[in-house]
Image (cartoon, grey):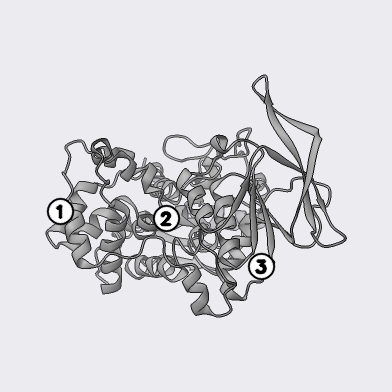
Amino acid sequence: MAEYKKPKTEAEFENNFKQKNPLMNDTEAYYEASRCLFCYDAPCIQACPTSIDIPLFIKQIHTDNITGASKTIFESNWLGNACGIVCPTGVLCEGACVYNHQDVPPIKIGRLQNYATNKTIDAGKVIFKVGESNGKKIAIIGAGPAGIACACEARTLGYEVDLFEAKEKPSGLTVYGIAPYKITNEEVLKEVEYLQNQLDFNIKYKATINSKAALKSLEDDYDAIFIGVGLGKTRNLELEGEEKENVIGAVEFVEELRMKHHKLAVPKKVVILGGGNTAMDAASEAARMGAKKTVLAYRNSKEKMGAYRFEYDLAISAGVDSLFNVTPIAITGNGKVEGVKFAKTEMVDGKLKTNMNNTFIVRCDMVIKATGQAKQGHLYGLIDDLEIDTKKRIKTNDEFQTSNPMYFAGGDAINGGAEVVNAAYDGKMAAQGIHNWLNK
């Protein structure tokens, strides 16, 4: 089990957050590519949300056609480099590899994907061009993975594209919400810059669309609008003491860490509430920032956690402790956090019940809530005739068109929060949907 000292310099921060899957060198990539069986009707393709022709790009790597491999990847997934790093490949493409049935390690598909696209990006190879102009314009709200993918696809179809991004940098969750031991800011931003240089889409930063007037302006100036916004802030738990100092949402904590690095102050004792992948990231990051005691607390059993098992194992290997079948009932302290009061939970007749006769306090200096994010309900409410489901997700048809025909949507706005690769697929296919609608 690792024990991390608090990083005081950027070098120490980088050492604590070393990349989980470092970039392959040429020899490693050649030998790994040589292991592929190039299956007919390959299960890895079927397991990829963007249906990349994985055997083809691996064959291209093996024959030293790195540019061709990158083109194969990007044609299916405009965020091919980032997804090669951050995708849960163990439960997607690599999890479907036939080698898993033979007690042989699966092909390292994600790392091969990252290898090829990274080399092509660093070499500045031009592999795409803007389609012939059709005189029509698309506005994209949000420059996250869905928005970037929609912009790239739309530009190859000849549309003028403007992205309106509320923050200072593009790529949404990939820059602001993913642990830095998975992917660095530099790696994310250089992919967006590479695509932008070839396809010439325009991103307007600090351009929040949050009023009827702003939407009316887009409706007047553009032929179609794509909603690619992510989720909002961490939801409140309505706990006693939740307003105390040093209670923070996991998404906000991860974002602050991504921006401040070693300058972020993390106290000695941290409790993380939640059992999803974001909770695992926050717990692992708190430990890597030098917290002496990091406790992950989840209301149900370990088997019921929403997080992938490898994410949980990664947090434990960073020195995180875990508590199961406990639910928070209050945050204690005088102004500042001093602890979390928990009650034990248990399954009774198939339902999770809280036992208020069995309570205890875990002392801590910080509480990180990883208990889900609010949807962007304010924005959705400003759009006329926009249908929302019971979980506050935008309803779309098979072409990603909403009930207001001028608006299309994808990513977290329609799935409530999934992987970067899902958003990349939605954005690409929504651009195709817009193209079909505008050319009927």
Rounded to the nearest whole Å, what is the CA distance between mark 2 and mark 3?
Answer: 25 Å
Residue 49 in the image: above or below residue 203: above
Q: Secondary structure at mark 1?
A: helix
Question: Which numbered tag is attached to residue 266?
Answer: 3
CB contact under 8 Å: marks 2 and 3:
no
Quarter location, residue 392: top right
The kind of residue on which mark 1 rests is Ser
Q: Do we see residue 269 in this rendering? A: yes
Q: On the image, numbered disc 1 is attached to which residue?
A: 34
Picture residue at 64% right of the left edge, 64% below the top? 292
Q: Nearer the viewer, mark 2 or mark 1?
A: 1
Q: From the top left corner, tell me how far across and down residue 146 is, in percent.
A: 46, 52
Question: Could you say which quadrant of the image residue 100 lies in?
Answer: top left
* In this rendering, position of residue 240 left or right of residue 63: right
Q: Position of residue 132 (x, y in %)?
A: 28, 60
Label 2 Cα crowd, 10 Å radius (few <14 / some 14-19 / many 20+): many
- Residue 166: in sight, yes or no? no
Label 2, on which residue?
86
Which of 22/408 is in front? 22
